[in-house]
Image (cartoon, rainbow, N blue to C red):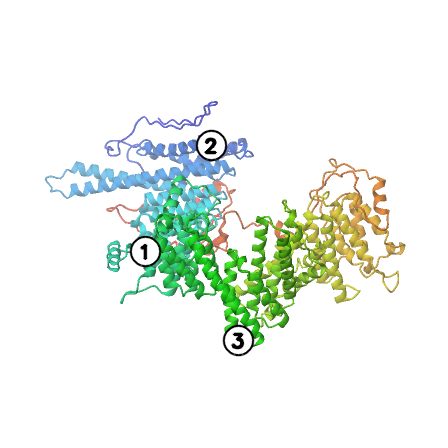
Amino acid sequence: MITSELPVLHGAADTVSLSVSVSELEDPTDTKGKKKRGRPGRPPVRTPFYESPSLCSRWSEWERVLLKMTEEFDEDSGDYPLTMPGPLWKKFRYNFCEFICVLIRQCQYSIIYDEYLMDTVISLLTGLSDSQVRAFRHTSTLAAMKLMTALVNVALNLSIHQDNTQRQYEAERNKMAGKRANEKLELLLQKRKELQENQDEIENMMNSIFKGIFVHRYRDAIAEIRAICIEEIGVWMKMYSDAFLNDSYLKYVGWTLHDRQGEVRLKCLKALQNLYTNRELFPKLELFTNRFKDRIVSMTLDKEYDVAVEAIRLITLILQGSEDALSNEDCENVYHLVYSAHRPVAVAAGEFLHRKLFSRHDPQAEEELAKRRGRSSPNGNLLRMLVLFFLESELHEHAELLKDWECMTELLLEEPVQGEEVLSDRQESSLIELMVCTIRQAAEAHPPVGRGTGKRVLTAKERKTQIDDKNKLTEHFIMALPMLLSKYQADSEKVANLLQIPMFFDLDVYSAGRMEKHLDALLKQIRLVVEKHIETDVLEACSKTYSILCSEEYTIMNRVDIARSQLIDEMTDRFTHSVEDLLQEAEEADDDDIYNVLSTLKRLTAFHNAHDLTRWDLFGSCYRLLKAGIEQGAMPEQIAVQALQCSHYSILWQLVKITEGTPSKEDLVALRRVVKSFLAVCQQCLSNVNTPVKEQAFMLLCDLLMVFSHQLVSGGREGLEALVFNPDSTLQNELLTFILDHVFIDQDDENQSMEGDEEDEANKIEALHKRRNLLAAFSKLIIYDIVDMPAAADIFKHYMKYYNDYGDIIKETLSKTRQSDKILCAKTLILSLQQLFNELLQDQGPTLDRTSSHVSGIKELARRFALTFGLDQIKTREAVATLHKDGIEFAFKYQNPHGAEFPPPNLAFLEVLSEFSSKLLRQDKKTVHSYLEKFMSESMSERREDVWLPLISYRNSLLTGGEDGDRMSVTSGASSKTSSIRSKKGRTPIHKSKRIEEESSVEASWLRGNDSLQTPGALTTPQLTSTVLRENPRQAADTHLPDHDSEPGSENDYVHNRGLMEDDAEPIFEDVMMSSRGQLEDMNEEFEDTMVIDLPPSRNRRERAELRPDFFDSAAMIEDESGFTMPMF
């Protein structure tokens, strides 16, 4: 007797239980004399499930049951046990699946063959799996797949029993005639036939589930249902590989690798991982691997990180089973993922890389080689391979935490041995770069760049590891670094990297370990490097190293300070004499004189950046060079650039000394004199013929004007008032002219300015970066009110034209200036539009073509400016009103020389101004309209010609809003391509809006006075209504057009413009509305053309006659239920 207890919820102590009890369990080996339940005598050959007459007779009953369930189910809630959150429902799902497995396991010897239980259950699940109700379809599919898994287990047991019975039968039959037991032979033969019949019935049941449910639901519209099907088919193939691990079933997993949902793709990969883990199954997977390998490799770049990780692990398993299965290109696609910012992806790729490159080395051979070469570490060859990989990948800053610095140093310092391969120059550079990178990670305990999620507090264990690593690297490199610098001192790239190592030292080790001699050796090597190189990066690295070693907190400071002072003394003396020689010879100076000045000045400038060298008075010599260059006009540009930079550092160090102490009046006067003279020199350099000199002078002018601005006296430093410099109008105009001439230039102009040299992409990016820095420096002067804000009009007018290059800088400048002064910012915006309009008048004359792209560009810029005012009209009320006032005055500023009946020359500007009408409050629109009428004559209001359309359009934008509330303005002129679109979205409901009374004093305050427009200050605050921002129609179309082909988690990252019906992608979704009865009626015809589950014969079982088709053959065709025929691949 089988009893089932369905879930029952008991108040607060909700419990879910499923139990099965079977009164009689039969021994599978004890079948003698027993008859199957419901099968008296010898059982007939069973009719397949889909041909059973009982099914059709019971179908109408099931149909009524399903209809009743559908009517009573509350589908609107969307909740059912399989989707309910919480541990209770998770336990229910587990118990529900376990119940099905236990049911089949307990009934596997008789009850499942009674032609009633399984027919009933399978027919019910088949009907529910095709229901329109998601809950029924989801639950029945899960039950059917678990039922199929249990039946597969039964089929596997039957196969084992059949093999055992066959073996016993053969052994008994091979006995001598006298010892042979004929009764036992008959029993074994009868048992074998019975097992064969049972296996045939199990095949029929599995065929019924697979064809009636799986082939429809594995491409269901619900991702969870598809995931269940793929997960279970993976279990079948692993559990009973002889029957299910073939092309007929693998194709479903291969097709579903293209699923749009990451959850389903993840199930596919995990199912395949379970198969590839068993190396004995590789021969059966060979065809599948060849067909879908490219897809699996592409999934390593999946946008879902979990999917990418599992894809890499699957590729690793394929590599373990057969190294020939992956090409070099496939491996390279995975190699680069070790640099992924997502740590699990990088770790998985690292495991693949280790398996591919490092798994073949022989540790014993490595140790013997290390002993022969006198190395302390056997990792030499591994590091060589790592360096080769580093060079091939051409990526850096993400090296793993390799701490075998002794081996790295030995590889770099060892002398070449005849017959043994040595590191090339590129390999040595890469190994040094890797070594420095690993030192940085060990000392700072930071993850690779982009890998961390933010600042994280180290645990006690991690902190201890960091301290130990720092002590270890300090003790090693204190002795090794001088030797490395000595060997590579002629190579600027290697030296610049090696000089980064001291910044990670624990400098107390020098004094605590009595290692001053190694410190002297290091200082000696650094001095030699300074004397040998003039490259900026090398000199800056040396300067920074001296700065770190001169820290006052360490006892070695005095020793390092003496060495540094000696070096600076020598360079200063050399520089002074070289300058004297150069100035005396003037135009007769040769290349040696110029080189001596330039090389020494570069070294001093690099050191002046990090060290206070004011006591050597370098400013005087640099100033003399600059004055001589200005007067004579023959100073080499590199000397001028370095002299400007060195003078700048000198001024900043003098300011630091004054701000940190209590300066006297003489000190302030002296510094002011120095700053004033240097600013004058920089201003004169703006007209230099050499572009690098002009750019350097401009940047230093902007920096010094920022430093010595009114901000200097803030924070209680009123005593520094004498040092404040405010640029006069001449200097401001020169700075603005420089920006317009050197920043807002076309690419062709830039190429011509580069003397026709062909720039590669890197040079273009560098040039753009330099121009952005110039613009940002000038924009800061505007933001901090050092340069008058109207100067920004010449920058704002280029917002649209140079949006890709400087859009972010201009937008930020606009935002900051509005925060400083809303009204002045609005005046600057309208001024920029007026400048563009005037330029257009000069180009096209007084009769503008309002349909031209130039006019549309100005209107588009005005629309962008209007959007920057935001949605809060109260805050921007006065600014917008001032903008309209200035715009109206500009439109009527000049009268038409032909007479009053002709429109003013600037009247077309009103069409641009109408873009800001939507930002006016309702009562303000009326007031602005009244102000507009003051400039209009009676004849103007009656004119309707095309030339008067801007005025009509602007008036309508004001009147419309004043009558009907805050709606979008409609620009007159059908030919305008940028006309606004009226929108009612977001309008405040009429029953919620409040009418605001308009006081008569409001209009009076706007109209009185000498044509002045004053924003009313005592108006009643209107109720805010939604303001609909206008969008570019093309952008709006792109924004609101639904993307039917894109879902979250789709594989668009690696399959572009490729549908699921192409190549090897089988359709995933089907219409779940197809009736189950229609399926069952057509099942006989349909199954003739589809695959039938055919369990493999045992070792002594008769072979099947039919041949299996190759389902991966490109000629194979599949027919969908709808009759649509398509190629599989």
Give the label on residue 132, or none.
none
- Residue 475 in the image: x percent, y percent? 35, 51
In this orientation, which residue lies closer to the viewer: 901 or 598? 598
- Residue 1111 in the image: x percent, y percent? 39, 53
Whether 195 is drawn above or below 316: the answer is above
Q: Would residue 943 appear left or right of 327 to someone viewing this image?
A: right
Q: Which residue is mark 2?
A: 86
In this orientation, which residue lies closer to the viewer: 118 or 795? 795
Name the residue located 60 percent from the left edge and 48 percent from the top edge. 662
Q: Which residue is mark 1?
A: 407
Q: Secondary structure at mark 1?
A: helix
Single out the residue that lies furthest toward the bottom.
588
Q: CA distance from mark 2 to mark 3?
A: 86 Å
Q: Which residue is mark 3?
A: 590
In this orientation, which residue lies closer to the viewer: 617 or 463? 617
Name the residue located 62 percent from the left edge and 72 percent from the top edge. 632
Of the two numbered discs 3 and 1 in the rendering, the one whose residue sits closer to the viewer: 3
Q: Is the residue marked by circle 2 packed among few (<14), some (14-19), or many (20+) residues within 10 Å?
A: few
Q: Earlier in the sequence, mark 2 or mark 3?
A: 2
Q: Earlier in the sequence, mark 3 or mark 1?
A: 1
Single out the residue that lies furthest toward the top.
11
Whether 1031 is drawn above or below 590: the answer is above
Residue 668 in view, yes or no: yes
Instruction: Report the amino acid beneath label 3.
Output: Asp
Single out the residue that lies furthest toward the left.
178
Q: Quadrant of the N terminus?
A: top left
Q: Quadrant of the C terminus?
A: bottom left
Q: CA distance from mark 1 to mark 2?
A: 54 Å
Q: Secondary structure at mark 2?
A: loop
Q: Is the residue marked by circle 3 packed among few (<14), some (14-19), or many (20+) residues within 10 Å?
A: few
Q: CA distance from mark 3 to mark 1?
A: 49 Å
Q: Earlier in the sequence, mark 1 or mark 2?
A: 2
